[in-house]
Image (tube, grey):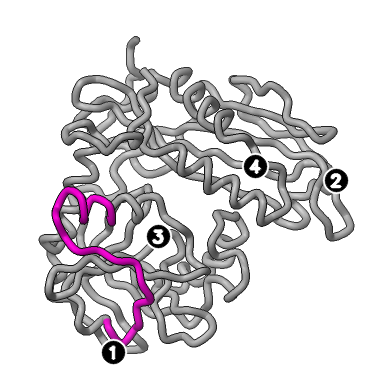
Amino acid sequence: MEKKNLDWGNLGFGYVKTDYRYVSNYTNGAWDAGVVTEDDQITMSECAGVLQYAQTIFEGLKAYTTEDGKIVTFRPDLNADRMMDSAARLEMPIFPKERFLDAIDKVVSANAAWVPPYGSGATLYLRPYMFGINPVIGVKPADDYQFRVFATPVGPYFKGGAKPLTIKVSDFDRAAPNGTGMIKAGLNYAMSLHAIVTAHKEGFDENMYLDPKTRTKVEETGGANFLFVTKDGKVVTPKSGSILPSITRRSLVQVAKDYLGLEAEEREVYFDELKDMAECGLCGTAAVISPVGKVVDHGKEICFPSGMNEMGPITKKLYDTLTGIQMGRIEAPEGWIRVIG
């Protein structure tokens, strides 16, 4: 199978149309058989539920070429589980787990020529999503839905290495205490857009959202979970009912315990504790870990000892180990790697 003629080493993190995508429709209370198609266009009513009331959910994961030339995905079963939780919360039909995994396999296999070669630093990003498609004018769930998966090759999130970020404590709230912060709904990300544009205008890379109830505890950014390392080498991640259960974050915690022999815990992290942390990172599918060098709280700077030049030593070990697992250089825990071709 011949790869596409792309400059793999210089891909950005953006959309590139590939050859095939998967589509399944839900009508009359059931999902159809689904199809792999070349058609990338969506036709719907001007009154479609997704357009009127933002009834849409999505996932994000990647396919990789491993060191031995296999094409694999990383823990797609957890993406399937999380999408099922998201659908239930927004009164959408569940797309069955095995069908989700089959759809991912089909899209990756059909677009195998678009999976970047090993060592290029690039990957094939996969976007499963679902939305209400029939006309809805009263405030209620849609009756009909469409589930789709597309793929796009992407370069490394940080070209030339991951330089530590400077982030600000946001005055906005990302999610309500009993809202939808724990699911991957499009509306959560729409709410974060003004805050991130504001942060960028002010010279910051990202926002730190505090808990909306007391504004004393660290939650997450608009698109990633936080991970901290204490000065005695313990890995700590914030625990909250209104943050997204990141698959990358959960994997890093297990890597810390089982591969690096570190103590790791998920607990409430109070903002006042930041001054005592040694390292900080943002974790998610796109970059795995983005190091944070500085948090600015309304002019007051909190600088982590790891500095503004490179990842902290434990963050770097976590990053190298997890990416090594994903790329096949390090043996993976059972069930983490799904081989497609």
Circle nearer the N terminus (4, 1): 4
Stretch of the chain drawn in magenta:
253-273
CA distance separating discs 4 and 1: 42 Å
CA distance separating discs 2 and 4: 15 Å
Kindly identify which residue carries mark 2.
Answer: 135
CA distance separating discs 1 and 2: 50 Å
Kindly identify which residue carries mark 3.
Answer: 224
Residue nearer the viewer, 220 or 18: 220
- For badge 4, the amino acid type reads Met
Q: How crowded is mark 1: few (under 14 residues within 10 Å), some or many (20 or more)?
A: few
Kindly identify which residue carries mark 4.
Answer: 130
Kindly identify which residue carries mark 1.
Answer: 300
- For badge 1, the amino acid type reads Lys
Q: Position of residue 93 (x, y in %)?
A: 71, 43
Viewer-nearest of discs 3 and 1: 3
Question: Up-down: is 247 above or below 301?
Answer: above
Question: Up-down: is 265 above or below 150?
Answer: below
Element under label 3? loop
- For badge 2, the amino acid type reads Pro
CA distance separating discs 3 and 2: 33 Å
Is residue 256 rendered magenta in the image? yes
Residue 315: which numbered mark, if any?
none
Q: Position of residue 27 (x, y in %)?
A: 81, 33
